[in-house]
Image (cartoon, rainbow, N blue to C red):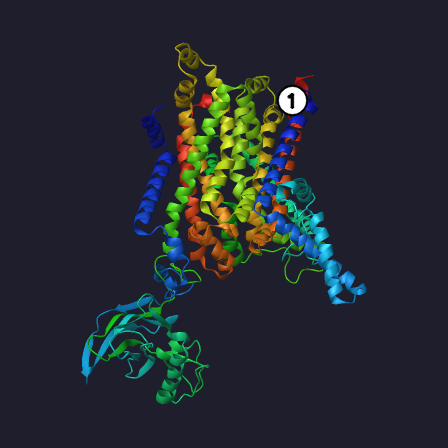
Amino acid sequence: MSLAMTLAMRGLSLLGVLLAVLVLLVVVLGATGFSDGILKAVVNEDIRAMRTGLAQTIRDPDDLEFALDAQRAELERFYGLDEPWYQRLPDMVRRVITLDLGEARTLRTFEGSAHVLSLVMERLPYTVLLLTSSMAITAVLGLLIGVKLATMVGSKLDRIVSYASAVSYALPAWWAGILLILLLAFQLRWLPAGGLYSSPPPEAGLERFLDLLWHAVLPVLTLVIVSLGSWTYTVRTMVLNTAQEFFVTVARAKGLPEGQVMRRYILRVAAPPIATNLVLGLAASLGGAILTETVFNWPGMGRLYYEAILGADESVIVALTFMFTLLYVAARFLLEVLYIVLDPRIRYSER
Amino acid sequence: MSGREILRVLLGSWSGRTGVLFLAVLVFVSLAVVIVLPLNFGSQRWNNPAEWADNPKAAAPGWTTLWPGNDAASHRIFDSSIPREITQVGPSQQRTYAFDLDYDGGALPTFMSFALSDVRFASQPPQISVEVLRPDGRSIQLYRDVVRGPRPGEQPPYARHFDEPLRINLSGSRETLESAARFLGREFDVQSTAKELAGKAEQVVFGTPTSANLDGFTPLAGRYRFEVQVLAASPGDTIGGVKLVLAGTTFGFMGTDATGRDLALGLLFGFPVALTIGLVTSLLVTTIGTFMGIVSGFLGGKTDLGIQRFSDIWSNIPLLPVLIFLIFVLGQRLWLVVVIMILFGWPGLAIVVRSMVLQIRSGQLVEATRALGASRLRIMFRHILFQIAPFVFAQMIFFTPAAILAEAGLSFLGLGDPSIPTWGQILESGFRTSAVYLGYWWWILPPGILIVITAMTFVLLTLGLEPVINPRLRRAR
């Protein structure tokens, strides 16, 4: 199998994931009548826009209603509301993919738009910011500590990290977040408890940016704390496994300096599985972000999820479910590419 | 490896022993709760505001009073069905129920309430009054009323408040406040109206005004006597019980939430629920996953390809977003959460089991059994299953906290089953009503700690089971 072929196969499988979620979404929506509700909302919205337009030209209220009813019937036919739900599935799939899901019931963007697409797109950067920054910090710290730990197996620190790794599996990030809020924001008053900016928010420029960073400290800290233990432990174990291979012994026997052995012989080989774990961790923390953002009132897609549930905003929930799956699939695909870049065995094997 | 050997390995390590101990406690508490509390506790009691009306709202646990410098009033309930004194007044009977309270001059009760239950009378409805005799000899009337008389066409004996007691919140009642205003005017020459006294009923009852305007009250320490007088027209009239509640600033062992619910009960009920969610989900995930994995690996061919393609896709679907969507659309039912977690959980295990089966299948044991003429079913579910059983068992333990945490997360987002209280839901209600910002730590910390401890129990068990999983098999992953 060639390189492109391998990548294509994995891509296809991940596309299958996306497709499976899409089908699940539209079938469940259709069978439960939710898609009817969403489409009717779209129709109502069109009619409302039309009413203001037509009111300029048609003066007589009865004529206006008649014209609008005719329009409504046509729109319902256009959207397929006169057909059973399973005939509308392809159209619904297209709608979900393009997030063309009409307007949110109560949620609004910062500018006041209720459009689902702009609502989700507005929140996306905040989620990505939170996830990538916490992931980057965790990755760097975990690599540094993990590599160090692999050289001191059995030490006190090593045991502490292995326990921390076990605890972090049982410690939900959102709960840790609440603890940190209670401790750092309310008890010690060191950090803001949540939100994006102080109130009133700083005008613009550097000050505003610093304020944003200041508010990001606690959520990022939480995500780092809950994932650092297991991540460090993973790095340590991977490095340790590789360090026991014969070629490492040979490298040492050749008298190579320890730093070079670590970089060129151990880390280079341990890199692919470490990267796998990193991206898998990122994908898993996507779900966690829904809860963490809720706790910290961080206006990303996760917080939007919570608000949509509170307000029973079905279109937004559909859009977010799809977006989270899309992000997940994208992260996984990134992993595949990364794997090929890092692991020469895949690149060169089938030439 | 036999069951006994697994147990020996488990008890051989520190983490295994701790895990077993924790699990024993969890199981014991769960069993006790299932025996003591009714199964419909959630819908019948937990979510029934009348059940908790007499409790103080958002009160800290009772033991917080043990902290030095923490001044708190404890929650007092006076409940009686037998009058302390009966005197004959003409043809009528005057029955007195009396309760004594020692007030130390510290924190005041947060509210006073009075309840009357199961009144039965033959002709004339009884008169009820509640009065406080203060240590300074003064007395103040808190309540006075006549039980509702016969309706037209109703036949004696007349029964009142028999299925639900009559409950009066004295602190918020207009009559009580008016009576308090009269009391201040009569005894201390302080003129006031019921409106001005709103929220100050306890200060009037348990103190003396410091000035002519209602600026402050000096607490009056000493013994207070609360008297409930019932004037019954005939000796055959009965009163089921009278109850006087002086709500404290603290309550019970775990405190209360903003609606007065006893958090200790809700937390206790969470034990069996969490264990059931975790164990049922993990048991079924492992059963289905193992079955499909063995079938896929052993049979091979199209079956294998089908199961593996399906599992590849299905196991990569992110659980929480899909769970949120499905529960939101299909309804907030706990069994649905469990079913969805099972549906999305088994394929991951099936992939791992298959890779192990592939290795065992080509081994000598299977070859020998096949040569002896064993059927495929027998090989699959006796010889192969037996070899991977320890691994499967460890996987089951490993998957349990994931299910518990997923349910807790879902509940925290407000998608919990409203008829079954869980730790996640208690946390959610606290978070939604900003208990975090108000500093109601007793509402926020215990449910989270219990979630973590329960999940931790299974993590410890997994650690203890590590040696059980044959390293050769583990490498096959």
Tell me if residue B165 comes above or below residue A308 in the rendering. Answer: below
B100 to the left or right of B368? left
Taking B190 as reference, is B339 above or below it? above
Residue B193 at least partly seen: yes
Q: Residue at x 46, y 18 (%)?
A: B360
Placement of B250 over or under B346, stated as above or below: below
Please give left or right for residue A329 compared with residue B201 in the image. right
Kind of residue indicated by mark 1: Ile
Residue located beneath label 1 in the image:
A346
Residue B65 spot, x, y in % from top left: 35, 63
Instruction: Identify the secondary structure beneath mark 1.
Output: helix
**Viewer-proximal residue, B177 or B124?**
B124
Q: Position of residue B243 (x, y in %)?
A: 30, 70
Q: Position of residue A156 (x, y in %)?
A: 45, 36
- Using the image, determine if residue A235 lies above or below residue A187: above
Horizontal arrangement in the rendering, residue A333 relative to residue B78 (left or right) = right
Label 1 environment density (alpha carbons within 10 Å; few <14, some 14–19, many ≥20):
some
Count how many numbered circles sit on residues in the image. Answer: 1
Residue B186 image position (x, y, % from top left):
36, 89
